[in-house]
Image (spheres, helix red, strand yellow):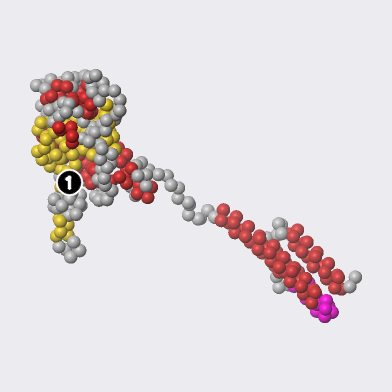
Amino acid sequence: MSYYQDLLKQSQKLLAQFQLELNSLSLEELNIKYLGKKGLFNQLASQIKKLKKDEKKDFGQVLNQLKADLEQGLNKIQENENQSHQRLDLSLPGIKQNIGHLHPISQAIEEISQIFERIGFVRADFPEVDWDYYVFAALNMPDNHPARDEWETFFVDQTAHPKLGKMVLTTHTSNGQVREMERVKSQLPIRMINISRCYRRQSDNTHTQMFHQFEGLVVDKNINIQHLKGTIDYFAKEFFGAKTKSRIRPFHFKFTEPSFEVDFSCQICGGTGYLKNKHNKKESCRFCKSGWHEVGGAGMVHPNVLKAGGIDSKKYRGFAFGWGVERSYTLKQGLNIDDIRLFYSAEREFLEQF
Ligand code: PHE
């Protein structure tokens, strides 16, 4: 066997040995043993000088290939090690799990219930699809009364009840008033908080066809407007913050007498109606313009409503209030949401902010 052939064999053996040892030696050991300065490859390559001229050329190519094979083998190990390192690196920050949260309106409902439960109100639940009687007629709004027009009603396509009239989607939570009076069967007092979905035929950037209201109803002996105002004040401070003021203005509802609209002082300008601009000059608050936000209605329960609920209106009096959850929530947050429909759009980017 010529020396050249011997070297060829040696190069084949070297590669075979390398492949055998790939899994038993570390990357560093392999590097030193095969490709180090005094490693097996260099030892073999140094023999080239002993070859004849044309053999040198051929053997040079063999050596190039051998080196490429060795390097490729080492690179593969390096890659594997990188990957397994990644898997094992306990110091890497964790991947944040998206765990979600309650819808902002559910959060508000929860908070509102708790505020009223703290002063002895009991949370009630009544049908969202109800008879005309509870939604209108029992609330002192007989058939065809023009006051009904204020509630843009969805009617359910179903035969009317002989006594209770048509079936409607509740336009307000006031349907709970007479229902609660019937439920307690003159076991007074009543301290009810009814929070529910309501529906009206209106959809624009400040209205959704489905929205939520909460309704308070108190019926007892010697109830007067101060109790109503006190309760509204309490809610204002608990829900919006200690500095919030409330005011009631005369209004008209068929089911309360007297009736009021309820305003809360603006969270953004603190009820002043002014904000300071960047030049420290007063300009009118762009959230409220007047210092106040109108939120809902209230009043002393009309004797006819007490009568409809089987309560002696000579002995007992009541107050009621009702307003929108969405509106209260956006005011609380000082949010000026361009389009309130976003709450029900299932837009995650919007909802994740709350
Ligand atoms: N139900 C009325 C509305 O939807 C609000 C209200 C509730 C008014 C209770 C008076 C008493 O506008």
- Asked which secondary structure carries label 1, the reply is strand
Magenta range is: 42-56
Q: Which residue is mark 1?
A: 293
Q: Residue, x 80% and y 64% (percent of image)?
A: 13
Q: Nearer the viewer, residue 256 or 143?
A: 143
Question: Residue 175 appears at what percent x and percent y?
Answer: 22, 28
* Image position of 263 (left or right of 350): left
Looking at numbered disc 1 in the image, what kind of residue is underneath it?
A: His
Question: Residue 233 appears at what percent x and percent y?
Answer: 16, 40
Magenta span: predominant SS is helix
**Within 8 Å of ligand 1, the CB of disc 1?**
no
Residue 126 seen in the current view: no
| Badge count | 1
* Membership of 55 in magenta stretch: yes
Question: Residue 192 appears at what percent x and percent y?
Answer: 22, 29
Q: Is residue 346 above or below residue 304?
A: below
Q: Residue, x 60% and y 55% (percent of image)?
A: 84
Determine the image quadrant of residue 101.
top left
* Image position of 166 (left or right of 101): left
Q: Nearer the viewer, residue 255 or 281?
A: 255
* Image position of 171 (left or right of 89): left
Question: Residue 82 appears at what percent x and percent y?
Answer: 59, 59
Determine the image quadrant of residue 264.
top left
* Membership of 130 in magenta stretch: no
Determine the image quadrant of residue 191.
top left
Residue neighbourhood size for the residue with mark 1, other residues' Cα within 10 Å, grouped as few (<14), some (14–19), many (≥20): many
Residue 13 seen in the current view: yes
Q: Residue, x 82% and y 69% (percent of image)?
A: 8
- Farthest right residue in view: 1
Q: Residue, x 15% and y 43% (percent of image)?
A: 263
For the N terminus, which image quadrant?
bottom right
